[in-house]
């Protein structure tokens, strides 16, 4: 296999990891990991929010910490390489639960995450994120689903009993 093909495969693997890591850190509210994913000059556009990494950190923390549960599911990303730059397009379904009013409300978002990425000094990180909403739905719960023998995704954080501690 040619060196260029191997280089492209390695880049796409790393970029796919960055997308997966983004969803994971958002669900687990692990804000300390943002700096390993995004370059400091990254730009964000969620429609109702536009700004840099410092402003995004506050925006996303306030938004996501208001939910008792979060699940960001990404489709297999499409990764387009152009030298040391890339665009990543990942379809998504996001489900977020609030507890109030009891027994709770589920907000469901269908959309796509458009990430920019750049390799600098041999390291790939994200340069930006634009979120495109396709569909939104809100479902008021009629019963509390937390009874029974399941492990529920309530209260995920770096301090959660199931969090990875390396």
Image (cartoon, helix red, strand yellow):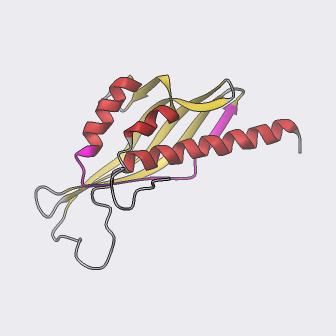
Write the start and end of the magenta stretch as one range.
Answer: 65-81
- Observer-nearest residue: 82 or 41? 41
In the rendered image, residue 154, in percent from the top left (x then y), is placed at 28, 60
Q: Residue at x 47, y 31 (%)?
A: 35
Which residue in the rendered view is the most extreme toward the left? 101
Please report the residue visible at 10 percent of the width from the left and 57 percent of the height from the top.
Answer: 101
Outermost residue, top side: 41
Residue placed furthest toward the bottom: 148
Q: In which quarter of the image is residue 7?
A: top right
Q: In which quarter of the image is the N terminus?
A: top right
Left or right, 45 with reference to 120: left
Q: Is any part of residue 50 visible from this angle?
A: no
Determine whether 6 is above or below 148 in the image: above
Question: Measured along the vertical axis of the image, is residue 63 above or below residue 138?
Answer: above
Spot occupied by residue 146 in the image (x, y as percentages of width and height)? 23, 71
Residue 162 horizontal side relative to residue 64, left or right? right
Q: Is residue 54 in view from this perspective?
A: yes
């Amino acid at each position: 296999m040619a060196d260029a093909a191997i280089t492209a495969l390695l880049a796409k693997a790393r970029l796919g990891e960055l997308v997966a890591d983004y969803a994971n850190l958002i669900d687990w509210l692990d804000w300390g990991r943002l700096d390993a994913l995004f370059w400091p000059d990254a730009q964000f556009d969620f429609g109702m929010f536009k700004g840099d990494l410092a402003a995004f950190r506050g925006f996303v923390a306030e938004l996501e910490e208001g939910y008792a549960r979060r699940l960001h599911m990404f489709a297999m990303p499409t990764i387009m390489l152009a030298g040391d730059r890339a665009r990543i397009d990942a379809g998504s379904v996001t489900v977020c639960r609030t507890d109030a009013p009891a027994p709770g409300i589920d907000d469901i978002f269908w959309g796509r995450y458009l990430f920019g990425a750049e390799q600098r000094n041999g390291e790939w990180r994200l340069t930006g994120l634009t979120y495109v909403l396709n569909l939104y739905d809100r479902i008021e719960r009629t019963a509390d689903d937390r009874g029974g023998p399941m492990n529920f995704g309530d209260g995920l954080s770096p301090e959660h009993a199931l969090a990875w501690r390396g």
